[in-house]
Image (tube, rainbow, N blue to C red):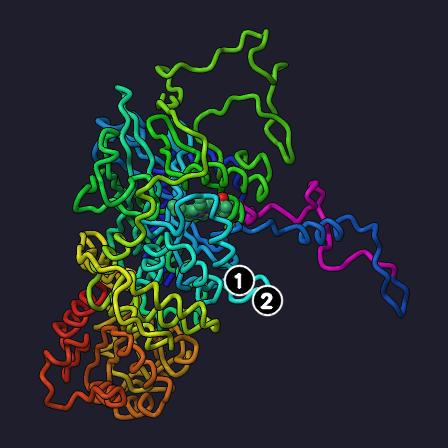
Amino acid sequence: MTSLLSNSLEKASRALDKTEHGAKVAQLSACTKDNTHPDWRITTDYGVKQSNTDEWLKVASEDHVGPALLEDAHGREKIMRFDHERIPERVVHARGAGAFGTFKLLESAADVTSAGVLTDTSRSTPVFVRFSTVLGSRGSPDTVRDVRGFAVKFYTEEGNWDLVGNNIPVFFIQDAIKFPDVIHAAKPEPQNEIPQAQSAHNNFWDFMYMAPEATHMFLWAMSDRAIPRSYRMMEGFGVNTFTLINEKGERSFVKFHWKPTLGVHSLVWDEAIKINGADPDFHRKDLFMSIENGAYPKWRFGIQVLPESREHDFPDFDILDATKIWPEDEIPIRWIGELELNRNPDEYFPEVEQIAFCTSHVVPGIGFSDDPLLQGRNFSYFDTQISRLGVNFQELPINRPVCPVMNHNRDGKLRHTITKGPANYWPNRFGAVPPAKPSEGAYIDYPAKIAGIKARLRSKKFGYHWNQAQLFYNSLTEIEKEHVAAALSFELDHCEDNVVYDRMCERLADIDLALAQKVATMVGGPIPQQAGRPNHGKKTRGISQLEKPAETPTIATRRVAIIIADGYDPVAYNGMKAALLAAQALPFTIAPRRSPIFAAGEDRNTGKGVKPDHHLEGMRSVLFDAIFLPGGTLESIQTLRSSGRAMHWVREAFGHLKPIGATGGAVALVKEAFAVTGLAFSEDASEEAVESYGVVTAGKVSPDGFKEVVSVAKAGAD
Ligand code: HDE
């Protein structure tokens, strides 16, 4: 699969290195070495070549070897370096994957900001993006039900701008002081460190009830958004309210958005939990392989802007409350830029692990608001990088800005910049230039007028916890609502404490009575008879992910399993493979074994056969977006029919509503597999009836048939 498009790719990626990534890649190459250099031999870290790196220095006699000597500097260095390889993992968002890319501005936002990255359409700004899950440890699986991090570091000409967002536009809490509480409640419980990477436990749902401000967000977390099909197919949101300041000094409030051109797509829960076992790196691999194959993921960049004067125009919510969206019906999004991820990291640790994001890193033209969550984040990120990476974390290659850095910060653990000159303070007598003026590009702190009492308070509209929770639920389609009910039923089923699930059933009645009744019945809680709060019935655009298909329907990068056995039909097999490759999908040949499989009529002594990519036991249908069975001789059909695993592949793919194609004798096999599901398609079932389930069958093999499978798969992909 790696080599699918790799030649053209390698070229493309090298070309990109020189041009698009520009400054950042040039800077990183100064600290990048290639350990495959043919003249290099193993040395110690202090550069001395070693002749033996496999045996510790020992005392040896004729019949005995040992003890080992402490004197072995190479041995000690090797072990001690290893002992210290781990650093503290991120306290949240520990599990992540990242890539380099390019941000291009398509339309200037100079009317609202002076930031070069948002006004200069001739620029191409290098970026690094890190996607993550929140709750699990570094080694936890990818497809858990969780919020996903979407953190972008823009290496702009005016310094680094870190837009540290999530794939869900709201948050659980309103004030940063509650962050340790919500995270403690969600992470594994303290008495036994169970469960890993799950919100399905007593403490999480206890907190969800006790902190009503979390209601809106927990609905998002129970929706399909929390089990994305791929990092490439999820939206990103800055969540907090930031500000933009233009050349005239006028300030606006802003929310930032990312929208994937591939559309927003999710797994179904049954798939997600099985993928966690079958391939815990599913998302990480998906991102890596698509970039490796030249299918660069892209997002549109958008801003929702409100002039300062409109701050109090919204009676239902406070625009500084991170538990609320700004409904698109009221404040439309301006799509002004494009992000493309087009280069994989060279090494995970120094790049993906050591990248350090700080919400406080903004550039001139961008500022903060009084959003109390953001204010706390601005403190927290810088602080956590110091404990995770040390005070000199901004000197690490991945974190360095591409513009010059000049100040009098010095020393600290692992400082390695050597700064010349006698003065490490300002002002000094050596005639150093003074700090820049705003006209010379200096950051301006917006002169906001503040007056008030000192108190631990939230503003009044922060108390409206139900209206947008209802708005979210009402805006989903019926199938999405069913998924929310199923997710809640799953999660509360994992809570043994009836105080927890009883109360949650009561809480759900504040959102929607039917939802509460459905979940209460499933989890054995008290069934509410009336709504806690009447549902206002309002809906808004931008919530349902079914409104967000791919810009152009595509199955590029989608994984398709072609299942064959000895005696398969080579015309159908090769034809379908070619049709899939032409559509830039990723076909995988799956068979009962990985040694060669022979086509109908092929001599098994002299023929080469086809070497499958995997055998049926090595993979599972959950790892593919669609399956195809090309049919063949009676023997080939019989081999698959008598394999419980093969039949399970077909049934499971059907159960997960995946497109299934079959030709020739495989049509009967597919129908037989469905019979067990209670959906027996009789021989004379109409084509439409069958296709409505995403199943395309054809007695005869034809190029049109392949195209049809591809087009059904495209529709299925949406
Ligand atoms: Fe974070 N968050 N967060 N967070 N967050 C961290 O910083 C914090 C919040 C987000 O890939 C930590 O470097 C507080 C909202 C992402 O490296 C820490 C509050 C959003 C990442 C931290 C929040 C996020 C983090 C842990 C409440 C969406 C991973 C490691 C006030 C907009 C970045 C680190 C990466 C990471 C604190 C809430 C997104 C502890 C105090 C809201 C994507 O500093």
Q: Residue at x 38, y 25 (%)?
A: 451
- Residue 580 shows in the view: no
Name the amino acid, label 2.
Answer: Asn
Q: Which mark is residue 82?
A: none
Q: Indicate whether residue 69 is drawn in magenta.
A: no
Rendering coords of residue 643 (x, y %) = 36, 89
Residue 212, picture quadrant: bottom left
| Mark 2 and mark 1 residues within 8 Å of each other at the beta carbon | yes
Residue 412, picture quadrant: top right
Q: Which residues are magenta?
A: 34-59
What secondary structure is marked by label 2? Answer: loop
Rendering coords of residue 512 (x, y %) = 25, 64
Q: Residue at x 57, y 21 (%)?
A: 408
Residue 124 higher or lower than 472, as above or below: above
Q: Nearer the viewer, residue 537 or 579?
A: 537
Quarter holding the C terminus is: bottom left
Q: Which mark is residue 192?
A: 2
Residue 371, picture quadrant: top left
